[in-house]
Image: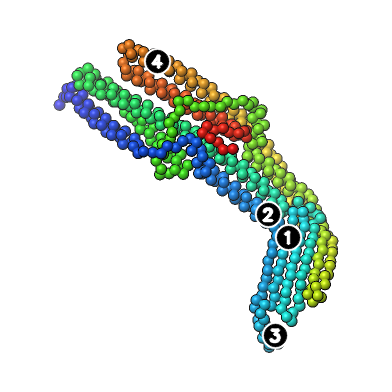
Amino acid sequence: MVWSTKVRLWLAAAVIALSAVIAISAVSWAEPHESREFLSLGEALARTVEKHPTVDAAHSARNSKALTAARRSVVYNPRLSTTLKPLSFSVRNQEAKLALGESISINGSLSTIQGWDFSVANRWQGVEKESVGLTVGASLQLWPPSRYEADYLNLLEARESAALAARQEYRACMQAMIDTYRRYRSLQIDRDRLAVHKEAYEADLAAYERVVGKAEQGLASAVEVIVAQQEKAESLAVYQRALRDYERELKSLQADLSLEGELVELEPLPARLDSGSVQITLDQAVALAWEADLTLRERNLALASARRQVEAKRVDNGVELSVGGKAEFSEEQTWEPAFETYISFSYSLCDGGLKELEKKEAELALDQAEQAVQTQQIEVSLEVESKLSEVQWLEDQMQIASLNHEKVVLQHNARILQAANGLIPQAEAAASKRLLLQAQFDWLEAIVAYEAARLELLMMTGQALNIEGGCPN
């Protein structure tokens, strides 16, 4: 059977019309209809400080380091204990005895960072047993100096780690706020682009319907119908993908701000966005980054710790010297005191070479720590140079996008005049408006990209941030 061209066109038109109805239904179902609460940029930044997972993780790490430092300092806190025998049963010479409250003792001690050790003990015995009474003692370690003791070195390291963790928490907060600013502004732009994509699809749909109408009248070929259908399908696919991407990214932002399950809408996109300027040379940026880089600071702390360990191993020559004394108050002697003072000296004659090996290990660790600092300084310098170059490039792109926007504005104004004078169809003027909006969105995206990179450069160099929408000090 041979079908005529007109019948084939009618069949194609029916299939295309059905697909258009399905597509329109898909678009209408994909669009959100629920009423949503507005979330401003300032509110998003405030919630970032309180709710962002990165900030929470950094806060937990800071608390953990603070607890470690507190645990290390416990060794220098007073300690007190008591021992009590409330009941005692004994058998001697076939004679059994049951005693109540046989003995009670109290022991206390205190160590200081300066090397002092204080102790106090008191013990009460039951009847028919010797009573010890009160004993008070004190000693001072003269060599090795107490600042080289393991407890003190561990305490210093823990305190430095806690201070570093506080800086890391602040840095994580700033990084999260920059990320929120970038995502919030990008979502605003993507949301407004959706309207342009939808309008483009509707224009292609109208053009397709016109071509189908012409084909029914024999004024358009089957190829023209297929081309119009292809353009309509492409614009629909672009719109639906953009809508899915927007909804997914909005859900991701809500999750990071602990707004899961809530209906949230972003505030309207401003016609213009503000941006700051960068007034710093490469040498200045590198010098500031060396002071602000947390990885470099961490490695410098490790270097300082390695130096302390080397010093401790060098002074540990096997000699231990201390002075002390104690006083005893015996109950049997009506609490008459007995005093004793002493000088304690010890020297390790042979340890199998252990101390020498420990010294070499500490010196090797020091060399590695110095090399790690130098390596990180080079990496920081390269990172700053790369970021400064990126900022300069994005600033140029922002200016280029601004010029392109001005050009498209002029072109659009010309299209409006031409359409008003009947020189071009209104559809071309509408398409020109969409091009103008796309150029404006491209310009705003360039501003957001530049501003985010500029803020990251300020953070890398330890300078104060001024994020649009608010930034805590």
Nearer the observer, 25 or 383:
25
**Res. 205 image quadrant:** top left
Which label number is shown at residue 11? none
Q: According to the image, label 4 marks what residue? A: 413
Which label number is shown at residue 110? 1
Q: Earlier in the sequence, mark 4 or mark 1?
A: 1
Q: According to the image, label 3 marks what residue? A: 92
Left or right placement of residue 411 versus residue 67 in this view? left
Left or right placement of residue 415 versus residue 365 in this view? left
Query: Quadrant location of the C terminus?
Result: top right
Per the image, label 2 sits on a secondary structure element best described as helix
Type of amino acid at the residue the image marks with label 3: Arg
Residue at image x 34%, y 20%? 430
Q: Residue furthest left?
A: 1
Residue 264: x, y in percent?
41, 39
Q: According to the image, label 2 marks what residue? A: 73
Left or right placement of residue 1 versus residue 248 in this view? left
